[in-house]
Amino acid sequence: MKALVTGGGGFLGKAIVTMLRERGDEVRSFSRNKHPGLEELGVEHFRGELNDAEAVTKAASGCNVVFHVAAKAGVWGPFKAFHQANVVGTQNVIGACRAHGIRRLVYTSSPSVVFDGSDMEGVDESVPYPNHFEAFYPQTKAEAEQRVLEANDEELATLALRPHLIWGPGDNHLVPRILERGRKGALRRLGHRECLVDTIYIDNAAKAHIQAADRLDIGSRVSGKAYFLSQGEPLPIWEVVNRILDAGGIAPVTRTISPQLAYRIGSLLEKVYTLLRLKGEPPMTRFVARELSTAHWFDISAARQDFGYQPTVSFDEGIDRLRAWLKDGRY
């Protein structure tokens, strides 16, 4: 395998790159910034923006599989920025595959592409895309996912993976946000319901991408499909948050506000930030209020059956590894 990993220096991207190198595959990374750690792994690195079709096409030259991991994530920001990175960027990746005759494209999607603001309990991949999104990230990721799946044909095999809440040592998004807000005492439980959520440990997410790529080919069982990925052990959302806080030596969240109030606050803050053109991200948004007050756990039997996905690191073991990593002061 000679693989191109977009976002190869990011949290998930680097985990995929590392696993590919460990088994002897040639790997090339494409991202905006330089990542010295990749060079130590023997990875060829190309720099550029996803919305630059020429740069993406150049990076894909000579590869036979693409892991499209890079994206603009987040719950706040201008639509254009999300659209350029997530939609235009993905279209450029598809175009690069076609330009070089690359037969396999694995796209990193998100379960949020089918989130309609209500509970998602044990749903499988048959659940439809919603008619309305309350954030540009899931909206643009949904459009990008559809383009990837529609691109599956007799020349290019594609699939989309939907890992939910990736976390673990090296996390530069979810864990830092939880710890930062926990230290400030800025976290609140939303309501008193024990909403179950799925998460996925970083090693399990990376391994699933490689397993899926190995099974992917023109006309294969996995081509043209989307798959949910998780630990397969849903837990109450505030247990997950408090276990991560505990790993960082921070007190648990005990104070509560109603989901309805959180949603109203999020709506107001979005208007204020937009009107006043404030920098940064509102401390609450409508999308986050919905996410924190609803259940999100998924049927992952399709991934198990179609490409042999099996979580090898449990939630408890992952927390122990995270605790050790945080204790070493690496964050």
Image (spheres, helix red, strand yellow):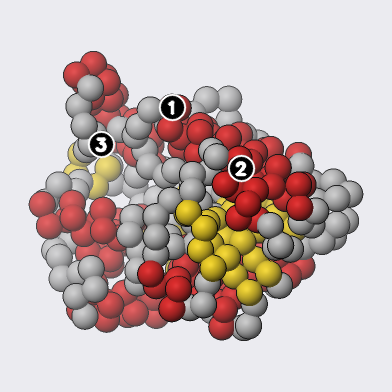
| Label 3: element kind | loop
Which residue is the extreme one toward the top? Answer: 275
Find residue 237 and report its image quarter: bottom left
Q: Amino acid at mark 3?
A: Glu
Write down the residue under mark 2: 54
> Eyeballing the image, is 14 above or below 225?
below
The numbered disc on residue 281 is 3
Residue 126 shown left or right of residue 268 in the figure: right
Write down the residue under mark 1: 79
Which quarter of the image is occupied by the N terminus? bottom right
Mark 2 or 3, nearer chain start: 2
| Label 1: element kind | helix
Residue 193 shown left or right of residue 279 in the figure: right
| Label 2: element kind | helix
Task: Give residue 229's position: percent from left, percent from top.
Answer: 57, 60
Q: Residues within 10 Å of mark 2 (few under 14, many from 20)?
A: some
Q: Amino acid at mark 1?
A: Phe
